[in-house]
Amino acid sequence: MSDSEIREDLVAETARLRFSVSAQGLRDLLAERGHDAMKCVKLGCDQGDDVCVYLVLDDSSAVQLNYREHYRTRQAIRIVDWEPLDCDDRDVDIARDAVAKREESFAKLRQERATLVRPTRTSLQT
């Protein structure tokens, strides 16, 4: 996978964390721990009994956290595990770089992606 493809995946995952209604509970839990979700980068997640999320936090540290969801709303209601990640993965390095550069690279990629995905009149009519 190229660095550009990794960045695209990170932008998509991070957009879900920052802007999805379904992630409000997780944003609240991160804020309780002193982290601004709007400055974090989401590397990915796995679904199980709990939801496992991999993040690069606003201080550039990487964590794996597991949280419980409310049975009706599916909002994150409690973090059950929080483990620092000590890894030298390309995804983590790219995410740390984005956080360290105050997301200049993310802003640029979002802008590039928006121009590529912008709907045309033809696509809206079909």
Image: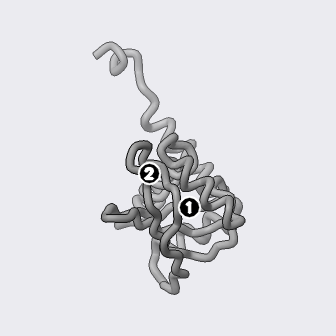
- Looking at the image, residue 50 sits to the left or right of residue 27; the answer is left
16, above or below 126, in the image: below
- Residue behind mark 2: 70
Q: CA gap, disc 1 to disc 2?
A: 24 Å
Q: Amino acid at mark 1?
A: Val
Q: Amino acid at mark 2?
A: His
Where residue 38 sits in the image (x, y, percent)?
65, 53
Most extreme residue toward the front, as rendered? 71
Frontmost residue, 4 versus 46:
46
Label 1: which secondary element = strand
Where residue 60 sits in the image (x, y, percent)?
64, 73
Frontmost residue, 68 versus 19:
68
Where residue 104 sits in the image (x, y, percent)?
66, 56
Residue drawn at x 71%, y 65% is 34
Frontmost residue, 3 versus 82:
82
Indicate the colouring scheme.
one colour
48, above or below 119, in the image: below
Most extreme residue toward the top, as rendered? 125
> Disc 1 or disc 2, which is closer to the eye?
2
- Looking at the image, residue 83 sits to the left or right of residue 103; the answer is left
- Residue behind mark 1: 41
113, above or below 78, in the image: above
Q: Quadrant of residue 69?
A: bottom left
Most extreme residue toward the left, as rendered? 126
Give the class, few, some or many, for how many residues have Cα within 10 Å of label 2's Cα (few <14, many ≥20). few
> Sequence-wise, which precedes: disc 1 or disc 2?
1
Total numbered badges shown on the rendered structure:
2
Disc number placed over residue 88 in the picture, else none: none
Frontmost residue, 5 versus 43:
43
Q: Quadrant of residue 47?
A: bottom left
- Looking at the image, residue 101 sits to the left or right of residue 6; the answer is right
